[in-house]
Image: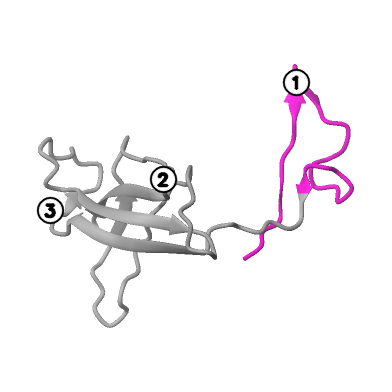
Amino acid sequence: QTSVFSMGFVCDGVEQDRHPWDPTSPTYIQHVEPIVAEIRIKRFIRSAAEVSRYLGVGKSDGTDVFLAVVRVVDVQGNGIPGKTVDVEFFQNPQYPLGNVQLELREGSVEQTNDLGFAVVAFQIITAAPEL
């Protein structure tokens, strides 16, 4: 997987000498090789939780939070420290659930430890179909 992106540096309102999207600019990045080869789901600490309402108040006891232990590894199978893991919702088109999303539990994002492990806390959020 590769990416093309750019960034610009600014100090006191003065921008860098070359436009960020100028291919000759050192901030124009044309090729990125991620070191992550695989995300391994090791286990779920909590695999059953309540569905949360969009803009609703979270449960203070955590019963609306799923917890998974994952390990992020490189091609040699070594854990990669300092990575964060996101969650994505994939809906089966044959069994639509409506306006449903997954999101990381606010304030719970943790980086992978020295061995590449992290606990990922996430919620299932539902909202009215028009949102």
Q: Main SS type for the magenta part?
A: loop
The residue to which callout 1 is attached is 11
Q: Residue sitting at 78 percent across and 42 percent down?
A: 27
Horizontal arrangement in the rendering, residue 50 relative to residue 91 (left or right): left
Range covered by the magenta-colored residues: 1-28
The residue to which callout 2 is attached is 112
Q: Crowding near pointer 3: few (<14 within 10 Å), some, many (20+)?
A: some
| Residue 58 in which image quadrant | top left
**Label 2's element?**
loop
Residue 11 counted in the magenta span: yes
Q: Is residue 90 above or below residue 58?
A: below
Q: How many labels does the image show?
A: 3
Image quadrant for the N terminus? bottom right
Q: How far apart are marks 3 and 1 (CA)?
A: 47 Å
The residue to which callout 3 is attached is 50
| Residue 94 in which image quadrant | bottom left
The amino acid pointed to by label 3 is Glu
How is this picture coloured? Answer: one colour
The residue sitting at the top extreme is: 12
Q: How far apart are marks 1 and 2 (CA)?
A: 33 Å
- Contact, CB < 8 Å: mark 2 with mark 3? no
| Nearest to the observer: residue 108 or residue 91 | 108
- Nearer the N terminus, badge 2 or badge 3? 3
Residue 65: percent from left, percent from top: 19, 48
Q: Distance between the residues labelled 2 and 3?
A: 26 Å
The amino acid pointed to by label 1 is Cys
Q: Crowding near pointer 1: few (<14 within 10 Å), some, many (20+)?
A: few
- Contact, CB < 8 Å: mark 1 with mark 2? no
| Nearest to the observer: residue 124 or residue 44 | 44
| Nearest to the observer: residue 67 or residue 74 | 74
Residue 129 visible (yes or no) = no
